[in-house]
Amino acid sequence: MPHRLPAWVETGAFFLALAAGAVNAIALLGFNHQGVSHLSGISTQIGIDVSTTNFSAATHLGLMVLSFALGASISGLVVGSEPLKLRRGYSVCLFGEAALLLGAMWLLGGGSIAGQYIAAAACGLQNAMTSTFTGAVVRTTHVTGIITDLGVSFGLWLRGESAGQRRLVICLVLIAGFILGGLVGALSFGWWGYNGLVLPAVVILLMGLASLLLPSGNISAAVSQ
């Protein structure tokens, strides 16, 4: 699958991962150590809160999960399910994500907890969009699967097999982008608080504008072999 992706995927994936890493860092610093770019920790915490009868906290986290899923549903509604086909719907999703992040910034700045749900929806939208386009090869809002891919690649290397150079490059690009995004998010939160969300929002907005310049339709003829 990676060899069928267009040559610009690495660049796009880097900036999307950077934006997600920044949003997650701001969430971790401002949402009582609750990340929003992935749901593993949140889902575990729901179980912990239920075990201690902290139902208000469990309900809040449940709404975070629901918001992430609703964000993903926007991608499903706008772009459908067929991978490896670039549609203008992706531009719509990127503009929508940028709007959600700016909305989250405004709500959080006003002290509204709804901003956390909006930020989670933005991450769900991005994760679904990139997973759909690449057939789940590129996941930009978390690195668990990417680290897993690297581990599998190392195991294949030990067996004398190759997992493909491009897959390794994509994995490293995503990890670097997410970590750098965490740095950017932490610094921006320290300087501007929740207003730091404007940085990942601008990155996503620019990605949406860039996607308008790419030809739509099937991309199989425009890939890097």
Image (spheres, grey):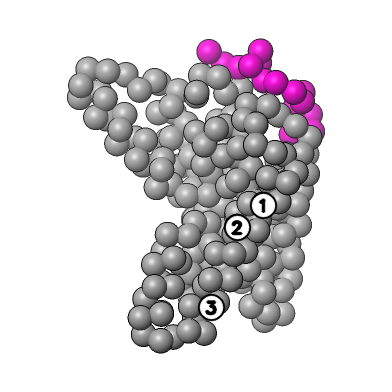
Residue at x 53%, y 71% (from the top left corner): 62
Q: As drawn, is 173 to the left or to the right of 147?
A: right
- Among the two numbered marks 3 and 1 on one chain, the one whose residue lies closer to the N terminus: 3
Which residue is the site of mark 1?
73
The quadrant holding residue 119 is: bottom right
Which residue is the site of mark 3?
59
Dot 2 lies on which element?
helix
Residue at x 45%, y 66% (from the top left corner): 42
Rendered location of residue 98, percent (x, y): 72, 53
The quadrant holding residue 91 is: top right
Kindly identify the amino acid type of the residue bearing the numbered disc 1.
Answer: Ser
Q: As drawn, is 211 to the left or to the right of 26?
A: right
Residue at x 71%, y 29% (from the top left corner): 86
Between 89 and 201, the one lying in front of the other is 89
Magenta stretch: includes residue 186: no
Q: Is residue 43 above or below residue 204?
A: below
Kindly identify the amino acid type of the residue bearing the numbered disc 3.
Answer: Thr
Between 156 and 80, the one lying in front of the other is 80
- Among the two numbered marks 3 and 2 on one chain, the one whose residue lies closer to the N terminus: 3
Labelled pair 2, 1 in contact (Cβ < 8 Å): yes
Kindly identify the amino acid type of the residue bearing the numbered disc 2.
Answer: Ala
Labelled pair 3, 2 in contact (Cβ < 8 Å): no
Dot 3 lies on which element?
helix
Magenta stretch: includes residue 223: yes
Query: What is the magenta range?
Result: 211-225
Alpha carbon distance from label 3 to label 2: 15 Å
Q: As drawn, is 205 to the left or to the right of 1?
A: right
